Image: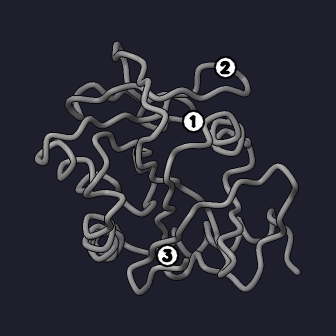
Amino acid sequence: MASKKEIRKYVFAKRKEMTQEEADRLSLSIYEKVIGLAEFQKASCIYAYVDYNKEASTREIIKKAWEKGKRVAVPKVTGPHEMKYYYLEDFSQLKPGYFQIPEPENCLEAAEEDAFLIVPGVAFDEKRHRAGYGQGFYDRYLAGHRKHKTAAIAFEFQIVEEVPAEPTDIFPDKVITEKRIIL
């Protein structure tokens, strides 16, 4: 079995090969699946990461949530081991933050404990095991906020044979790619 480090290296190389146009096109297929989910339809608030560097894009999902009158919250790293969600009303509220990832600035802290949360990740397997970026922000956040329904979004090439799982890992309820939904 490959280590998480080896898996990350493989996925980052694949992402680098992909054009922005390809990423946008595949993200649109993922978007269509996400907005069709009952969890998205029923949620009054969507917690979503802000995509960066050819990740599966969340921008159309965020726009659709606003269009449907839902609140949207996005994460901000607030300490060495802490991440919190803040309400986002417009993309202009984003500024480069932790590792240049767009983060909300001057926004109110989000308080929903039952939002539909879109999880990022570097790689997943068919058991929904997740390799993140290695800092543990999402696992720590989700460990303290258990009522969120979660879905990870990723490109099909991010689905690998096996991701090593650790006791502290929290798996998303589903993983959505441009080709399928893994339950």
Question: Looking at the image, do the residues carrying marks 2 and 3 touch, with CB atoms under 8 Å apart?
Answer: no
x and y percentages locating residue 139 in the rendered image: 70, 45
Badge 3 or badge 1: first in the primary sequence: 3
Q: Residue at x 45, y 73 (%)?
A: 176
Q: Which image quarter holds the N terminus?
A: bottom right
SS label for mark 2: strand
Q: CA distance from mark 3 to mark 1?
A: 21 Å
Left/right of residue 92 with respect to residue 153 in the rendered view: left
Looking at the image, is mark 2 or mark 3 nearer the viewer?
A: 2
Among the 4 quarters of the image, the one containing residue 22: bottom left
Within 10 angstroms of label 1, few (less than 14), some, or many (20 or more) residues? Answer: few
Q: Which residue carries the number 1 mark? A: 99
**In the rendered structure, which amino acid carries the disc numbered 3?**
Glu
Q: Which residue carries the number 2 mark? A: 79
Badge 2 or badge 3: first in the primary sequence: 3
Q: Residue at x 25, y 72 (%)?
A: 32
